Image: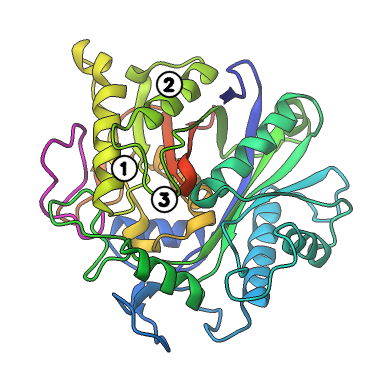
Amino acid sequence: MSGPRGDSDVLITGMAWSTALGSDLDDVWQALLSGATGMTPVPSAHPLRNDRAAVLPDLPVDLDPVRRQLEAGSRTVRAAVSDAGLDITDPRLRLVVGTSYGSHLDVPPDGLNVWGDALATELGLARRPLVVSTACSAGSDAISVGAALIGAGEEEICLVGGVDVLTPAKRLGHSALGTMSPTALRAFDASHDGTILGEGAAFLVLEEGSSARARGARQRGRLAGVGSANDATGPTAPDPSGDTVVRAVHAALAAAGRGTVEVGVLNAHGSGTPVNDDAESRAFATAFANGEAAGAVAPVVFATKGAFGHTLGATGALEAVAVLLALGDGRVPPVPGLRTVMAGFPLPLPSGGVPLPFTGDVGLSVTIGFGGFTTCLALEAPA
């Protein structure tokens, strides 16, 4: 599945995030470039494979998880709206929000949409939101839904993104599954052995181009295309061949009217689990083989989960913001914990704690979720 097409004019006029490294866009980006990580010991009442996690520094861990999710979401949405030069009371705003399980593994569920209604009410939005829950691709899929609504002429401005908070049940679940690293999250490293959970939120303001230009809005970038695929391999593990990622990447670029040789930077899912990292490595080798054969400069790959933790339903939105900041900077931050790149990884990676420059105005963000949900966003630097 793909969309929007390259002739759709979906501009990004605002963005914000809340991360384990803080919430200021520029300050967090500089922290990432320096190799900082938000990982810290977080007490648990139950034995876990690892007691470390990446938590929001100004949101008490012992606060009720429903309240924590609303706090993280509401302040991040407000910051994105402010960044776009809009008012939260603007009746044109349509909220499309993603999460994985949110607080529902720890609090008796009353429907995954209810928390979205509560968020819209807290923000004072005039209309009910759309809620997306597609595991770790939820944030990316919320962005995709918003772009589709604008491309179809149904909406003029969409607030899109994801929120997820750390809870005891999530930590227990990943510990029991064996996806939690007993040591540290080292995406694409030869010694990678699992992921470490985090929490956060990120939102982007998507705006129809003529609307943005009419009000003289600043452009953060453009959402040029989206591609999605599902391998239906199983409830947790991805298709080890990486073919689903290849399909999503090619669909996003086709929708954007771009080719693989034009991609300068790629934010990988980079969860640090051997099965995911191996699948991505195979996928990138296949997806960018034509560019290599043509002698094109290979895109630089980076990953932020070693700094932010695996934020589940928020991860796609956080990583979309990271790609936009990378396109503006011309560098990517080092991959935390990466010292020896895994054998056979086909594209350049920033290792050794040093940022890596790149050229080009097209960036991709790839997310892979439990259940086979795979989404790729094609983003362009501001015109």
Neighbor class of circle 1 (other Cα within 10 Å; few <14, some 14-19, many 20+) is some
The answer to whether 264 is drawn above or below residue 372 in the figure is: above
**Looking at the image, how many numbered discs can be counted on the residues?**
3
Give the distance between the C-alpha atoms of the residues marked 1 and 3, in whole angstroms.
Answer: 33 Å
Q: Which mark is residue 236?
A: 3
Q: Look at discs 1 and 2 and give the one toward the viewer.
A: 2
The N terminus - image quarter: top right
The amino acid on which the numbered mark 2 sits, given as a three-letter code, is: His
Judged from the image, the secondary structure of the residue bearing numbered disc 1 is strand
The percent position of residue 234, horizontal first and vertical second, equals: 42, 44
Place of residue 105 in the rendered image (x, y in percent of width and height, measured from the top left): 58, 70
Q: Earlier in the sequence, mark 1 or mark 3?
A: 3
The residue type indicated by label 3 comes to: Thr
Specify whether 277 is left or right of 268: left
Q: Is residue 343 magenta?
A: yes
- The disc labelled 1 sits on which kind of residue? Arg
Nearest-to-viewer mark from 3 and 2: 3
The overriding secondary structure of the stretch rendered in magenta is: loop
On screen, residue 291 versus residue 11, left or right, reads: left
Above or below: residue 320 compared with residue 223: below
- The local secondary structure at tag 3 comes to loop
Q: Nearer the viewer, residue 28 or 198?
A: 198
Q: Which mark is residue 250?
A: 2
Q: Say few, some or many: other residues with alpha carbon within 10 Å of mark 3 (under 14 / 14 to 19 / 20 or more).
A: some
Q: Say which residue label 1 marks.
A: 331
Residue sitting at x 65%, y 29%: 10
**Range covered by the magenta-colored residues:** 335-351
